Amino acid sequence: MVGLGKLGASMAAAIASRGHDVIGVDVNRRSVDRMNAGDAPVQETGLRELIAANRARLKATLNHEEAVLGSELTFVIVPTPSDDRGAFSLQYAAYAFREIGKALARKPGYHTVVLTSTVLPGATRYGLAPILERHARKACGEGFGLCYSPEFIALGSVIRDFLNPDFLLIGEFDQRCGEHLEQCYRDIMPGRPPVARMTLENAELAKISVNAFVTTKITFANLLAELCGRLPGGDVDVVSAAIGLDSRIGRKYLTGGLGYGGPCFPRDNVALGFVASALGVAADLPLTTDRLNRSVADRIAKQLQGRLGPETTIAVLGLAYKPLSHVTEESQALLLAKAFLEHGVRVVGYDPLAGDSAEHDLGGRVLVLGSAKECLRQAEVVLIATPDPEFQQLTIDDFVNSDGGNRRKTVIDFWRALSPMIASDERIEYIAYGRGGRDASNEDVLRGLWSESTFHGH
């Protein structure tokens, strides 16, 4: 397992838990030492316990050759960061493939190399395979096999997602290596998920397409939330539940709220747009999805401007890109905080897990506090930016009595997650994003659209 980050370390522990011996490789000595000590090199749900329970089948090394010579299959899970074109850089993968190739030059038997890091079409065959062949001094398909097999996981549930996938995606250089990898997966996955085997390029496109499609669906759900917020009596949850019953659509990822974030989703539409443009295909759809998602925070900040005075303090509850996560990369909550700072508003924030990361990302401009209740004591406007279970436990007293005064708080719940008692209490102004009230101006708009004069083309 080359690369002991969140995915690599989790895969190593999960595979070991299924009875296989696993050798981890990393250039970071601390990660190697922690794995060898039976500890997790990174934070991920359940990882420390799984490593400790399977310590006898896990070891780690700084030496690629040692790992390749002592195994029959190598997964490569290294960073592929976005470059200035919007594509995915191969610099870390190229280094790993060079070292693996050198080891293969000394290995007499057959070995399968599996790239798991996300790349764009053509990268495995035309970018990385030649590096293996040059350093191994063997042709791909003869002394070794090469597959592209990305995982579909979410941070915070990597182990569960890896062991219980909806399907397995295998891009294969030839049939031999594809069959080898599929058999390995069959030994690891308890649920025997369906397997889709195809060429390297088709698999590379399939991976990036899944995320691009899901983010397009999220963006559509967010459009519905904005529409329902303006529609008298509108309710995005009611609309989404109804259209989700259609088997062509489905309910997953159709919950309107804030935009998407994290280390994968935001960059994948840009990357799909890049490769589409390079191949002469119109890239409007993925690039528009990305543009709309990046504009969410500014649109919301402008909508709330009328409620904000020069001495207003806003509290942002939930700073990670999703609940129960330490990760703040591309977090919509942080984008919101930055947007309000640009409008001269004082911002405080809290997250159960991601407070330190958020404070670093915001450069100290936002006061990150130690609890949600501390935030409530200081703020007139409260934004529920993630549906974290901790926030769902807040009571009306936490909001009403938090500052010892009589100020009426405005609470904007982007995920409609707070207790119904809070939503119905007259002592706070509760705004459920994606639900519309009886706004007279919006009723007038609809009335104007369908007045009798419009029937006659006037």
Image: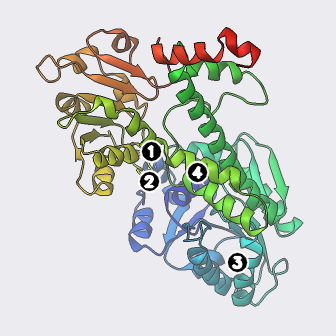
The residue located at (30%, 21%) in the rendering is 394
Residue matched to label 3: 128
Name the residue furthest right. 175
| Marks 1 and 3, how far apart at CA | 32 Å
Indicate left or right for 124 with 62 as reference.
right
| Marks 4 and 3, how far apart at CA | 28 Å
Choose top left, top right, bottom left or bottom right for residue 78.
bottom right
Choose top left, top right, bottom left or bottom right for residue 130.
bottom right
Residue matched to label 2: 329
Q: Is residue 213 above or below residue 401?
A: below
Indicate left or right for 149 with 79 as reference.
right
Q: Amino acid at mark 4?
A: Asp
Residue matched to label 1: 321
Q: Which mark is residue 377?
A: none
| Marks 3 and 2, how far apart at CA | 28 Å
Residue 133 placement (x, y as % from top left): 75, 85
Q: Amino acid at mark 3?
A: Leu
Residue matched to label 4: 290
